[in-house]
Image (cartoon, rainbow, N blue to C red):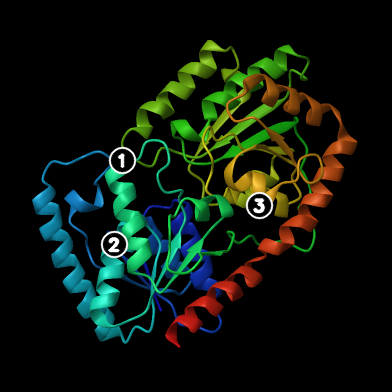
């Protein structure tokens, strides 16, 4: 099985690829990347075979709305598609399993040219804010005609895919659920947030809510832990702006910018509550289920995937996306109500078992093996 992604960055879809490939039991995965990057080391450490077929930078770094050099990008994509077709044949690939928008296109074409079934796993909402109509139309067309089967990571994502030949299978992102929740080790009460530093993830909203919560009565020793780093071009400026904002709000001394961390579970285990605050619908919200699996109560934006995962007041709290006051109120509530934290954490660990890694990998392998038949 060839797991295909144009990116080797440690973003959500790529991390899912690394976890799923390492846990496959009925298939033999080979990951084919369009660039060299940190994902190669993660895969090597898990004993997963990885091949790199470099995608021309003009195509790999193409962003929404750009039209310059379109003819050259088409030629480069054609070259890559032909090279990938030969590689897939040489590897004896039984299924091409694509994991990014660009990979859905050139991987889908290569699979068809090689006569190999294609399964597309869609991790992002198609046509979301910031994307171009042209790119959305291309992806809708690609997903309708090239894959033999489509997987979506949530019902929200599935609804964005347009008309497909067959309904998308909805399979959430996996989480490892330990037999017992790791204990919280001493220190001040801590809110944590994990995710790429980029405007739509809402770190600025969390900073403002944390400042408002402190004004509303939050214990002054309480800390905020931001785990994550800028991954792509425009994110660097946002990362710098967050530090300036913390200074302006007078909370810089109470905020820990942890940067990129490979030990995400350890970072979450150091928190009392995990916050998710995306300002637009999240396709799934992998951090949400990871926190629930670790027995950490979660406050999440009431939109997209997290709203499908969490039942408000039962196994987490949901707040209106971008609503600073609502988030601040939820933060104060959980910081001051130990009983509520315990109840949400316990119910969250029960709810998240449906996303257990073994169960999710089994669902995915069922679809991949069905495609070969």
Dot 1, how many residues are within 10 Å of its Cα: few (below 14), some (14-19), or many (20+)? some
Mark yes or no: residue 198 visible: yes
Residue 205 image-quadrant placement = top right
> In terms of secondary structure, where does tag 2 sit?
helix
Q: Which residue is mark 1?
A: 132
Q: CA distance from mark 3 to mark 1?
A: 30 Å
Are the residues at dot 2 and dot 3 in contact (C-beta closer than 8 Å)?
no
The answer to whether 76 appears left or right of 185 in the picture is: left
Disc with the residue nearer the chain's start (2 vs 3): 2
Residue 186 image-quadrant placement = top right
**Which labelled disc corresponds to residue 105?**
2
Vertical order, 170 against 266 (above or below): below
**Which labelled disc corresponds to residue 256?**
none
Mark 2 vs mark 3: in front: 2
Name the residue located 9 percent from the left edge and 52 percent from the top edge. 71
Name the residue located 47 percent from the left edge and 55 percent from the top edge. 123
Vertical order, 15 against 128 (above or below): below
């Amino acid at each position: 099985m060839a797991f295909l992604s144009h990116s080797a960055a440690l973003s959500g879809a790529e991390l899912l690829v690394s976890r799923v490939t390492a846990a496959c039991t009925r298939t033999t995965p080979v990951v084919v990347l369009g660039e060299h990057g940190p994902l190669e080391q993660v895969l090597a450490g898990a004993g997963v075979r990885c091949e790199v077929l470099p995608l021309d930078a003009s195509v790999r770094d193409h962003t929404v709305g750009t039209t310059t050099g379109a003819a050259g990008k088409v030629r480069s994509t054609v070259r890559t598609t032909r090279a990938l077709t030969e590689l897939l044949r040489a590897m004896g690939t039984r299924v091409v399993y694509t994991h990014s928008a660009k990979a859905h296109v050139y991987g889908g074409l290569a699979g068809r040219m090689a006569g190999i079934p294609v399964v597309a796993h869609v991790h992002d909402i198609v046509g979301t804010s910031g994307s171009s109509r042209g790119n959305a139309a291309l992806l809708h067309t690609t997903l309708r005609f090239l894959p033999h089967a489509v997987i979506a990571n949530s019902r929200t994502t599935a609804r964005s895919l347009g008309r497909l030949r067959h309904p998308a299978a909805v399979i959430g992102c996996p989480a490892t659920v330990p037999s017992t929740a790791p204990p919280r080790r001493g220190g001040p009460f801590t809110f944590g947030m994990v995710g790429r530093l980029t405007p739509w993830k809402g770190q600025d909203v969390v900073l403002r809510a944390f400042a408002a919560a402190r004004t509303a009565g939050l214990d002054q020793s309480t800390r905020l832990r931001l785990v994550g780093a800028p991954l792509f071009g425009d994110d660097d400026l946002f990362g710098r702006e967050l530090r300036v904002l913390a200074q302006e709000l007078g909370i810089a001394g109470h905020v820990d910018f942890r940067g990129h961390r490979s030990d995400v579970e350890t970072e979450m285990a150091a928190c009392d509550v995990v916050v998710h605050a995306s300002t637009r619908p999240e396709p799934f919200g992998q951090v949400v289920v990871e926190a629930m699996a670790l027995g950490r109560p979660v406050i999440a934006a009431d939109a997209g995937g997290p709203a499908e995962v969490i039942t408000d007041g039962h196994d987490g709290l949901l707040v209106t996306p971008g609503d600073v006051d609502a988030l601040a109120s939820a933060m104060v509530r959980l910081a001051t109500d130990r009983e509520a934290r315990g109840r949400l954490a316990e119910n969250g660990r029960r709810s998240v078992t449906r996303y257990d890694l073994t169960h999710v990998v089994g669902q995915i392998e069922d679809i991949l093996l069905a495609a070969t038949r």
